[in-house]
Image (cartoon, grey):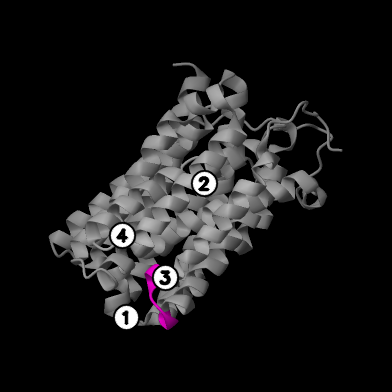
Amino acid sequence: MSPESAAVRAVYAAFVVNGFAFASWASRIPQVKAQLELSAAELGFVLFAIAVGSVVGLPLSGPIIHRFGSRRCVAVGSALSGTALVGVALSLDVGVIPVVLGLVLTGYGMASWDVAMNVQGALVEQRIGRAIMPRFHAGFSFGTVGGALGGVAMVALDVPVSVHLAVVGAAVAVGLPLAVRAFLPDREDEDEAPSYGFRAWKEPRTLLVGVFVLAFAFAEGAGNDWIGVALIEDHGAADAIGTLGLAAFLTAMTAVRWVGPGLLERHGRVKIVRGLAVLSVIGLGLFCFGPSTGVAIAGAVLWGAGLALGFPVGMSAGADDPALAAARVSVVSSIAYCAFLAGPPLLGVLGEHSSVSRALIAVIALLGLAALIAGAVRPLATSSTTPR
């Protein structure tokens, strides 16, 4: 097997396991809410903890990847987040504070892991000469579907949340550092200083791409965190049906990501992401205002399908110039993850005053903004090999 083929498989592993770990947690959020006896607003602030860890880690990722390489960053980040998830599992019977601390560390580890695997994915794209970033993100979605369906099984079998999350966390902490040993060495230009990761914050296009990705990240995070709760509390669905709704959302996203490269090659980035944003808005309308659980789940499917390519296209746009990929992907990711910082408490507070389904109307406005600024992700006409 060539080094490039081995690296492609290793990048897929990083994306799949990242998605599986996150969805395993997300699939048990309704049970965590019940076990800790949290209101919607209180749950929002617990979910805020994982976003805090992410936002702390993301701005540091570019210089750290430059210094230590994407392989080491993925290995250390996955070991940290997996170990922290075990800590969260063991803390559920102790109280909210240790759970929050564990989620902060989980978010920090996942953030550095996330940026590093995207940088390695961009490097592999350049090395093999094909745009396969959407399929790497499809791998993430395959992982989320697996994690969500695993959550359905755990709920149906009445497996305690602590046991479920502890097993997942231990497997992640041990397994992924071994899987990413096939990553390619990072290609860094000798003139690119580690401090360029902070200079990239002054680039208008990079910032606009970050806002574009933020809108899709907000909508994706809202689905991950609140679909199950909304189906159970607003539509009166059983716990297993609520988790199944999340699985349907994630399955639709996965399917569109898998066919995404062909769509992008035929129609271009801008036209596709704008059309999909509209599809997602239609799905959100059905989910928020649908008269039955079945209609709401159908809306979740359209919601997920429409979101599918926003995040990977934004990552590819940030990495269009491979010499500056680490710096720019770090900036784009940092802005995007502000959605995970603000989203859970915002939607939790809105849900406390009306309902979770009505709170999700806020997502529609952000997707409209993403459609308006989608031109920012148009491929660069030229790429530089040194910082400008």
Per the image, label 1 sits on a secondary structure element best described as helix
Residue 173 is a magenta residue: no
Q: Residue at x 36, y 36 (%)?
A: 255
**Distance Cα–Cα, label 2 vs label 1:** 36 Å
Per the image, label 3 sits on a secondary structure element best described as helix
**Distance Cα–Cα, label 3 vs label 4:** 21 Å
Report the mark closest to the observer, 2 or 4: 2
> In the depicted view, which residue is nearer to us: 196 or 274?
274
Q: Quadrant of residue 365?
A: bottom right
* Residue pointed to by mark 3: 358
- Tell me which segment is drawn in magenta: 352-357
First in sequence: mark 4 vs mark 1: 4
Q: Mark 4 Cα within 10 Å, few/some/many (few <14, many 20+)? A: many
Q: Residue at the far right: name it.
A: 388
Per the image, label 4 sits on a secondary structure element best described as helix
Q: Which mark is residue 36?
A: 1
* Residue pointed to by mark 4: 27
Per the image, label 2 sits on a secondary structure element best described as helix
Q: Residue at the far top: name it.
A: 1
Q: Which mark is residue 277?
A: 2
